Each structure stands twice: as C-alpha cells, then as structure tokens.
Amino acid sequence: MDVVELAAERGVTPLDAMLDVALDDDLETRFWSVLANDDPEAIAWLLPRDGVLLGLADSGAHVSQLCDACFATDLLDSRAQLATKTGAEWAGNAGKLDAVSEILRLLEGGLEDISASRSRVPWGVPFPDEDGHTVYVWFDALPNYISAIGYPGDGFADTWPAALHVIGKDITRFHCVIWPAMLLSAGLELPDVVWGHGFVKIGGGKLSKSEAKQLDLDQLIDRHGPDAFRYFLLREIPWDRDRDFPSVEAFLDQFDERYNSDLANDLGNLLNRTVAMARKYRDGAIVPPGGTALDDAIDDALETYVDAMRQHRLHDGLDAAMTIVRAANGFIDSEEPWKLAREPKQAERLDAVLAALARGLATTAVLLQPFIPAKAAEMWERLGGDEMPALAELPHRLPTALPERADSVLFPRFEREPRSG
C-alpha cells in the first residue's frame, strides 16, 4: 500500500499519513520543522534562485517538460568545488566500485539545475509557500542527516561535518553531487569522506522475495547472536565490493563455518585455555609482557590493523585482529605451557608465555570492540578489566590479574542439524 492509498484508507492527507507512520517522534518534529520553513536559512537549498520558477517563463518552456514545472537548485555554482572535492581521498573506496569515475564523468559533462519540487505528486511534503508543489523526495530525505543531529540548533556544529558518511554504492550520485551541492548552497561543510559499500548478492543478483524470507534478519541474528552476525558480515564480505553467494544455503553454510572456526574454535578456545592456564599455574597473576615471538606478531598486527581501519578497509582490519588469535593459538602449541609448568627452571619462560597470551587476548578484545562490542567487553572482563580502553591506552591497561569466576562459554559451538532430503 502506497502513501496515497494509506491516506485514503485513513481519511487523512498524504502528509498526515506519512507523519502517522514516522518511527521517531523527536526526529519527526525536528525534520518537519525544518521543511515547514520555520527557519528560512535552514532550507536555503530548497528555495528557487532569484525567485525564478523554472518552466513558467517563456525561455524555460523546454525545461518544464523535464522538470515538471518545478523549483530548482543551482548545481552550476557548485561544480568546481565538487570536482575539487571528489577524488579517492574523499570518495573512499568508490574508485574500486567505479563510483569516483562516474561522479567525475558527471561533473566533466556539465551539471544542470535539478528539480527541488514536484507539481504532480500529491503525497510529498508541501513546498514552502507554493500551493500545488511538493518537495522532491531526495530533497526531503537528505536533510535527515543534519536535522537528526539538531540542525539548525546550537548543538549542530558539535557533530557536523561527518568524518565518514557510509552509503550504498548505488546512491553515490545523490550523496556525492546533489547532497554536497545542497550543503554548499546552505553554507555548510561537506562530510570528510563518503564511502560506498558493496552488496550481498545471491546467485549473482539481488535477493528475490523468497530468498529474502529465508534470510530473515531476526532469524539470522538469533542463529548465533548479534555479535556473531556482525562479525560474519564484516569479516566475510569485503567492505569495498560485492560478495556473491551461490545460494541461500551457501550463505548459511558459510555463516555457520565462520562462526565455528573463527569464533567458537579459534577465539573462544584461546580465551578458555589462556585463562585456565593462568589460574592453574599462576593463580591468575600476570607479569608485564615482552620479548616473545607472539609479542612481535601482536606489534605487526597492530600496525596492519591501524592502517586498514584508517583506510576504511574493515574486513582487512578484522582479519588483522584475528591474526593475533591465530598466532596465539600457534604460540601455545609451540611453547607447550603445560610442559614449562613442570620444569621449575622454566618459570620465567612460563611467565613470559602467559603474559604474551594475556596481552594478545587483551589487544584482540580492544581491536574487536568496533565489530563485536558485547563479546569484546565480555572478553575484557574475563581478563580482569573494567572499562574498555582506547587503543592508545592499552599498553598501560594490560591485565595483571585474572579474576576467579565461573565463566560461560564465549561462543558455544554450533551443531547444525542435517538437512532433510
């Protein structure tokens, strides 16, 4: 049911129908107050240039066929600024998605004024002071980015401009040309970086209705928990391109495999083994780390992680964090702490091994915090920490004593039932 049909069913105007289904009353109030022209400067980009209504003047007759006799915003003045701003350093990964090239071609080909209103769309937001005109849908949608954080109120400048604006790769034109032009027209700063992410595909295309039902979001979250689902999407699917799964079954199989191998086996078992050995051999006491091969691996992973995250390559950053986990498990196998514990002369070596393992887990918890926040916090608590530190604070907040407590399994193994047929 579309907005017009909903309005007719409820006996209200289309605008009132949209308000009725708004999800957030506070956001709704701020958003509509901006569009209702409570503050003329707040919608400067929506107002016609020099009072001209394109398509009504004789010279603009041909435009009326294209822009539906609507008000327009001027992109011409913004072209030079947009061309300067658009580039790999601003559009993030978009070059790999051909989005930067698309935007640059658009700018090089010349920009024309675009319609900010529609005259034959009854369900839109009424255009200020003009009966019969409604705001073009993107012009009423895009301001949500700033009205949601209080524009044009006093606190707006505390959170704008955005350091990183994440969008789908299919709407780069709206966010790299139209939205910046609107902001420039209003005298506002542009986001530092616009990042267009790729898509999850099934069999080479977008999800069909039947596939979407099989990949119900709530069911996927319930399958292994919200953090595990976050991990899977951010680890398995490159942040800068599409990820195509042959089928829904392949998607679910890979989710289960990634959960069991990375989270239940590698990370969960590492935490359990390390905590158990530290309690058994040293009553939970941990000495300052340093000087082992694992410490070197941690240092290398930290450098890789920081570099990847600064470039918004989240999947590579997540892989760097898990590199520590893999190195730590290999370190246990090679050092065999249970043998060191039986040799009094190896006491210092055992201390160094346990310290390196505790440092590896603490570092992993901090690095994973953006990806699996709840489980990372649980890891940090299991290591004796309280509030999760920032990465820069970590060297001064490493575990020194593991608490005595009854621990639950961080990621229980998943045993999948055989498919019927």
Image (tube, rainbow, N blue to C red):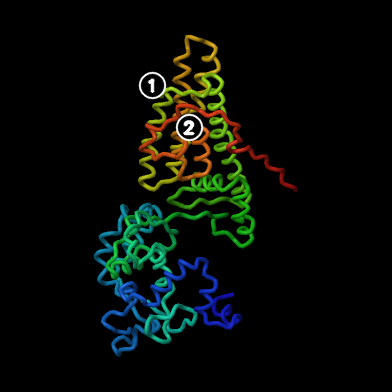
> Closer to the camera, 233 or 66?
233
Residue 64 vs 99, above or below: the answer is below
Marks 2 and 1, Cα distance to the nearest angstrom?
Answer: 17 Å
In which quadrant of the rendered image does the N terminus lie? Answer: bottom right
Task: Give the residue displayed 25% in from the left and 64% down from the top.
Answer: 81
- Tag count in the figure? 2
> Closer to the camera, 215 or 206?
215
Element carrying mark 1: loop
Instruction: Give coordinates of residue 392: x percent, y percent.
Output: 35, 38
Q: Where residue 210 is drawn, which disc sits there?
A: none
Instruction: Give coordinates of residue 263: x percent, y percent.
Output: 56, 38
Labels 2 and 1: the sequence-earlier one: 1
Please, what is the three-letter code of the amino acid marked with disc 2? Leu
Pointer 1 residue: 291
Residue 280 vs 102, above or below: the answer is above
Instruction: Give coordinates of residue 212: x percent, y percent.
Output: 60, 59
> Closer to the camera, 126 or 323?
126
Residue 403 vs 125, above or below: the answer is above
Say if residue 310 shows up in the picture.
yes
Task: Give the residue displayed 72% in from the left and 43% down from the top.
Answer: 418
Please, what is the three-letter code of the amino acid marked with disc 1? Gly
Pointer 2 residue: 361
Say if residue 110 shows up in the picture.
no
Residue 288: quarter of image:
top left
Q: Residue furthest bottom?
A: 58
Badge 1 local density, few (<14 within 10 Å), some, or many (20+)?
few
Element carrying mark 2: helix
Instruction: Give coordinates of residue 116: x percent, y percent.
Output: 37, 76
